[in-house]
């Protein structure tokens, strides 16, 4: 994806059936050597994001922690119904941070 304010993610888990806010847990499909920050206008799959929660607690089959996941808390819990495991969605209206490679 060649947008300066968006990244593509793969939905791993969706939690929206509790009294708390809805959560979409994703795996980032891009951003090597970069990071990002949310803005007040950030959306995932067209749904407003309340916050980014790092890192979600999850394990690989061998019981090692999964450090490749991002947890998004949605502003509107019912928006969780728009997501399903395996879906690819775009996180938009973010600020990409590029890191310079060390030359030392």
Image: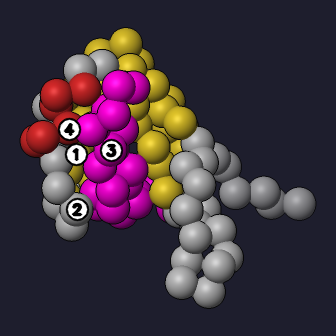
Q: How is the image coloured?
A: secondary structure
Sequence-first disc among 2 and 3: 3
Q: Is residue 56 above or below residue 87?
A: above
Q: Mark 1 or mark 4, which is nearer to you?
A: 4
Q: Which secondary structure, mark 3?
A: strand
Q: Which mark is residue 15?
A: 3
Q: Residues within 10 Å of mark 4 (few under 14, many from 20)?
A: some
The single residue placed furthest to the left in the displayed view is 82
Q: Which residue is mark 4?
A: 80
Q: Is residue 69 magenta?
A: no
Quarter placement of the C terminus: bottom right
| Proximity of marks 3 and 4: CB atoms separated by less than 8 Å | yes
* Nearest the eye: 1 or 12: 12
- Real-space Cα distance between discs 1 and 3? 18 Å
- Real-space Cα distance between discs 1 and 2? 14 Å
- Real-space Cα distance between discs 4 and 2? 11 Å
Q: Which secondary structure, mark 2?
A: loop
- Real-space Cα distance between discs 1 and 4? 15 Å
| Proximity of marks 4 and 2: CB atoms separated by less than 8 Å | no
Q: Is residue 63 above or below residue 96?
A: below
Q: Which residue is mark 2?
A: 85
Q: Is residue 24 magenta?
A: yes
Residue 45 picture quarter: top left
Sequence-first disc among 1 and 4: 4
| Proximity of marks 1 and 3: CB atoms separated by less than 8 Å | no
Q: Which residue is mark 1?
A: 90
């Amino acid at each position: 994806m060649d947008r300066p304010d968006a990244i593509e993610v793969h939905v791993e888990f969706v939690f929206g059936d509790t009294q708390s806010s809805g959560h979409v847990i994703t795996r980032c499909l891009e951003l090597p050597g970069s990071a990002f920050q949310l803005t007040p206008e950030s959306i995932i799959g067209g749904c407003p994001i309340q916050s980014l929660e790092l890192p979600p607690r999850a394990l690989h089959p061998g019981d090692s922690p999964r450090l490749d996941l991002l947890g998004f808390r949605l502003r509107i819990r019912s928006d969780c119904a728009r997501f399903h495991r395996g879906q690819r969605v775009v996180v938009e209206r973010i600020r990409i941070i590029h890191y310079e490679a060390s030359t030392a």
